[in-house]
Amino acid sequence: MYRCSLSCRVVRQFESVNSIQPLCTRYDVFCPQLHFSLSDTQLPMFLRLMQLALALYYGELGTAGDPELCPGVPLKDADGKLIDDPSLEEGSWSSWAWSLGSALLPVYWEDDEEHTLSAHRHRLHKTLHMGIYVETATWTFKLTESVQDSGYFGPTKMHFTPFLRVEHQGSFVTVVVRGMEASNVQLGISSLTVDPVGFCICGIADIQEGSVSDTQEQSVAAQGSPSFLTVGQEGQEYLGHSLFDPQVLMESQELWDYKYSWDRHTKEATEANLLARTGAVAMDYFYLMELPTDFSSEKLSEISSDLEYSNLNERALCRMVVGACEVNISSGFYHRLEAVSHSLAQHDYPPYASPPNQEPPGPLPTPSEEEVAALEANTPTRCYLLTLMEPVVVLHTAQHSAVNMRNVVSAKRRKKNRKACGDLCMARVLPVPRVQVKLSRLDLEWTRPMYPKRLVSAACTLRPPSPAMLHNCHAHLTVTVRGPLCVCLCVYVCLISCLFKAHRI
């Protein structure tokens, strides 16, 4: 990543003048430009960082089977005696990360008994709101190769060859966490384009139509071919409801409106409202857990470690909407995706969390009548919705031959393919057969239980299980196609001869 400028705005709300703990904290970061460059050797590292973030979020970084990964957890020897943790004395990265996290998100100890009620209310309703807003961002993917300079004893240098670029404008990511009861994650992109850069990784230029000379082939390789993906248009609506929106700063009451309701959120976060803010891609994830009003702090601490058997009403909905888009699937697009997939697989990193021990199957415990009634009345579920608005898919015929990904990363191999593609230049400049598919709308819905292990084990012990419980034990996938389906087939038969001109039939 190249250096960039950032603007950060922080707002905190306190319950009273004498309060020590903020009831709501909001961080908003704005960046005008971001430029990322990822090589084939850096892609596995980037994937590793994403896996680390997910492991930290789900609490899988330090499991019970790996106590060495948990900083601050007392270690025991074979005799059961406590030993000192050497990582704390040496100042490892894990202890530094935990100290940094406590500095950013301070932990307030509840030693004073007179503030127990206030601390309990703060724990239930404290809110953390974080947002990142980016005006323009580009991602350039490159192939690396060791190239030796002229001479037998010349030094070795790294040669970078870009082959794919992803550019998006008007992007934002917001995360809102309100105690244990609600979480809301929103993501949006105003415009998104995926373009080829230079020649294909097999050495052949991505040219679909038009007459191109040998001297212009390098420049037209990136300009003459259409974009692989085009969706949305540029706009400034993505800054709405942020600290960088002057209208929100004038109406300060909107900053602290975090009273979530399932019906209210589903009515506001519709496909039309999401695409009105960012016309390319919009995602909204909402999790809600209904807590009783007379919930004590001891009960909250008890169920926080095991929500599976809490019998609380939990629901989660993840909705993603993609605006009107056009996808061009060609040989160059397929080869570039194959190169990215091959680069991501070239690593031998150990997993952050060891897999759980597979215990041998035993007799299932018989659930009580209250547990069965609670499962039938309320089954926590997760629902994923994907909506594609007016998608257009263009499938071009194959113009490049199959390649071996282990040999294609070599520059010598690409130059050899580039010289050998002279016979294919005429085929590339002529129109090629393609299939175009247009839809008005495509909806995919996937629903699955949030805690399948408990639900299935309870249903297996019932003879017979209720239809509602049996239905909730399965994951359901629904695909809905709306509007007319238009399929266009464009085929050109070309007869090429050395004595006659080409005729199009």
Image: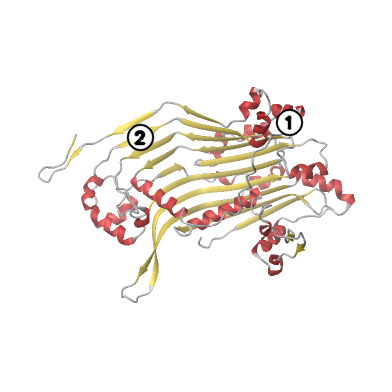
Judge whether residue 366 can be spotted in this image.
Answer: yes
Residue 475: horizontal and vertical position, in percent? Answer: 57, 32
Nearer to me, 134 or 469: 469
The image shows residue 451, relative to residue 164, as above or below, that is above
In the image, 163: left or right of 179?
left
Residue farthest to the right, as pictured: 114
Lower sequence index among marks 2 and 1:
1
Q: Split into 4 quadrants, where in the image is the C terminus?
A: top left
In this picture, is 251 found above or below 41?
Answer: above
The outermost residue toward the left is 499
Q: Which residue is mark 2?
A: 436
Q: How far apart are the alpha carbons under marks 2 and 1?
A: 55 Å
- Foreground of the two, 101 or 325: 101
Marks 2 and 1: which is nearer the front? 1
Residue in view at x 36 percent, y 38 percent:
394
Residue 450 is at least partly visible in this image: no
Q: Which residue is under mark 1?
A: 367
- The relative height of residue 205 versus residue 276 in the rendered view (above or below) is below
Q: Which mark is residue 430?
A: none
Residue 456 on image: x %, y %? 64, 32
Residue name at image x 69 percent, y 37 percent: 288
Q: Secondary structure at mark 1?
A: loop
Kindly identify the amino acid type of the residue bearing the numbered disc 2.
Gln
